[in-house]
Image (tube, rainbow, N blue to C red):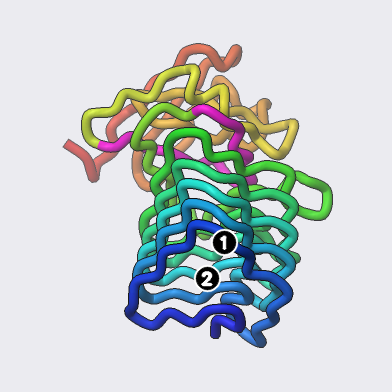
């Protein structure tokens, strides 16, 4: 774990410098963390591993600046493999590659919080594999206004974002999210952003985790129908 930096349960603050050219046999080429990491500047670049070429996080990572770029994962999470809590409100994640998906960020099971000027784009061998979720239960929590491009790569109808308490997602926020597949569509549905795998599915009912969603054929109007597991 963590060829560049291994952080078990400590606290690390990165405001400059470079973590580069490291190789881990399993996860966290540049940085592996089970503790707390704050990144406000610097560069994590040119690292590689099986999972999390740049960063493998099972703790708590906050990124407000700096660049995570040109990292490589043989499996998942070229830039960041997140299985903990990651909060991203600035900086840039670009040019990373993961051979099996999530070249920019691979998110599984826990929390992915997003706002601000974060840019997650141009990851993947064909620059179209940016943020990927492990399952339909995983999503991004939007904590504030989105002000830069974030690419999304999925293979199924999916709730990709929900709003933090007190925040209302706007169409302007939606417009900053980019479907990596040109056949896909993103739509705002009752304060959630829905990823529709194929535009041909517009105008049809779709179920996600027991809740039915409907988006009009023009993609501009939508509805959310409560499932049996909701009140």
Against 220, residue 141 (above or below) is below
The residue pinned by badge 1 equals 80
The residue tagged 2 is: 56
Residue 10 in view (yes/no): yes
| Left or right: where 220 falls relative to 144 | right
Residue 17 coordinates in the image, percent (x, y): 60, 63
Q: Do the numbered discs 1 and 2 sit on residues whose CB atoms are within 8 Å?
A: yes
Report x, y in % for residue 125: 82, 54
Q: Please tell me whether residue 67 belongs to the stretch shown in magenta.
A: no
Say which residue appears at 37% left-offset and 42% top-offset: 141
| Viewer-closest of 142 and 222 | 142
Q: With respect to residue 6, does 110 lie above or below? A: above
Q: Residue at x 63, y 49 (%)?
A: 93
Magenta segment includes 160: yes
Asked if residue 155 can be seen in this view, the reply is no
Quadrant assignment for the C terminus: top left
Residue 104 placement, left or right of 142: right
Between 3 and 226, the one lying in front of the other is 3
Name which quarter of the figure residue 53 lies in: bottom right
Looking at marks 1 and 2 on the same chain, the residue that comes earlier in the sequence is marked by 2
Q: Quadrant of residue 211?
A: top left
Which part of the image, by quadrant, shows the N terminus? bottom right
Find the magenta span and give its range.
Answer: 147-164
What residue is at 54 percent from the left and 65 percent from the top?
81
Q: CA distance from mark 1 to mark 2?
A: 6 Å
Task: Give the image location of residue 51, x and y in percent.
Answer: 61, 73
**Residue 73 spot, x, y in % from top left:** 70, 70
Judged left or right of residue 91, residue 11 is: left
What is the residue that sits farthest to the right in this orientation? Answer: 126
Res 18 quadrant in image: bottom right
Tag 1, which secondary structure? strand
């Amino acid at each position: 774990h963590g060829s560049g930096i291994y952080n078990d349960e400590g606290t690390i603050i990165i405001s400059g410098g470079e973590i580069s050219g490291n190789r881990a046999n399993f996860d966290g080429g540049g940085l592996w963390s089970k503790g707390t990491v704050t990144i406000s500047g610097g560069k994590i670049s040119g690292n590689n591993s099986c999972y999390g070429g740049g960063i493998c996080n099972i703790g708590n990572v906050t990124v407000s600046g700096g660049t995570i770029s040109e990292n490589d994962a043989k499996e998942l999470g070229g830039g960041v493999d997140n299985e903990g809590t990651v909060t991203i409100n600035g900086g840039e994640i670009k040019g990373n590659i993961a051979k099996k998906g999530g070249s920019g960020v691979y998110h599984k099971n826990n929390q992915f919080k997003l706002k601000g000027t974060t840019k997650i784009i141009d990851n993947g061998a064909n620059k179209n594999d940016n943020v990927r979720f492990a399952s339909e239960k995983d999503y991004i929590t939007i904590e504030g206004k989105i002000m830069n491009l974030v690419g999304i790569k999925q293979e199924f109808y999916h709730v990709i974002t929900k709003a933090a308490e007190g925040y209302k997602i706007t169409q302007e926020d939606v417009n900053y999210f980019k479907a990596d597949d040109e056949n896909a569509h993103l739509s705002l549905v009752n304060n959630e952003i829905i990823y529709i795998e194929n535009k041909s599915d517009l105008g049809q009912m779709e179920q996600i985790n027991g809740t039915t969603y409907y988006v009009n054929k023009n993609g501009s109007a939508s509805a959310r129908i409560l499932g049996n597991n909701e009140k």
